[in-house]
Amino acid sequence: MTAQTNVPSLLSRTGAVSVLTLAALGGTMLVPGATSEAEAATRAVKALKIAASKEGSPYRWGATGPHRFDCSGLTLYSYKKVGKKLPRTAQQQYNSSRHIAPSQRRKGDLVFFHWGGYVYHVGIYAGRGKIWHSPKTGALVRLERIWSPSVLYGRVN
């Protein structure tokens, strides 16, 4: 089938308005109820601000807030406050996020620390190579420079 024979078929299935809309958007198809990139970015920045507002909260293994957190509990809490549900553990959050290249990272993306194939820690990217996170027993939620090259990035849609 050639491109010429596809056009009438496409027009009959989607309607001229949909095809023109698709062309105007540069081929990006919008699905009703889907989150736009701009909405996702705004939500991510809001989640980042929520995490930052928890500065000084103590670490507690398994805690999901609002006063104590473990690493994935902080990310879960922050995104829940902006209407996005994340799974409980850092590994599950990595598995459910859209994986992105380091060059694509932006504020509010999740930063996953890994050893081999195992994700063991997560924080929220704050820009300039820093994350908000709840590091370990005896520590407080804080802003810290990414200390390892063994990181992966994920975006919450």
Image: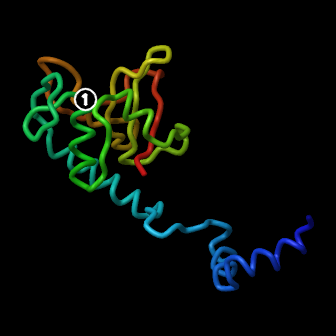
Image point (40%, 47%), residue name: 156
Relative to 53, does residue 13 appear above or below in the rendering?
Answer: below
Q: Is residue 136 left or right of residue 22?
A: left
Pick out the residue farthest to the left: 67
Residue 108 position in % (x across, y down): 35, 47
Q: What type is the residue that disc 1 sits on?
A: Cys
Report the side of 109 relative to 132 (left or right): right
Query: Which quarter of the rendered picture does the N terminus lie within?
Result: bottom right
Q: Secondary structure under badge 1? A: helix
Q: Position of residue 147 (x, y in %)?
A: 37, 22
How dense is the environment of label 1, judged by Cα within 10 Å: few (below 14), some, or many (20 and up)? many
For the residue pair 129 and 156, the one nearer the viewer reads as 156
In the picture of the structure, the residue carrying the numbered disc 1 is: 71
Residue drawn at (40%, 57%), measured in percent from left and top? 41
Question: What is the x, y in percent for residue 10?
Answer: 76, 74
Which quadrant of the view contains residue 95? top left
Residue at 20% from the left image edge and 20% from the top image edge: 136
Question: x and y percent of residue 101 in the render?
Answer: 55, 38
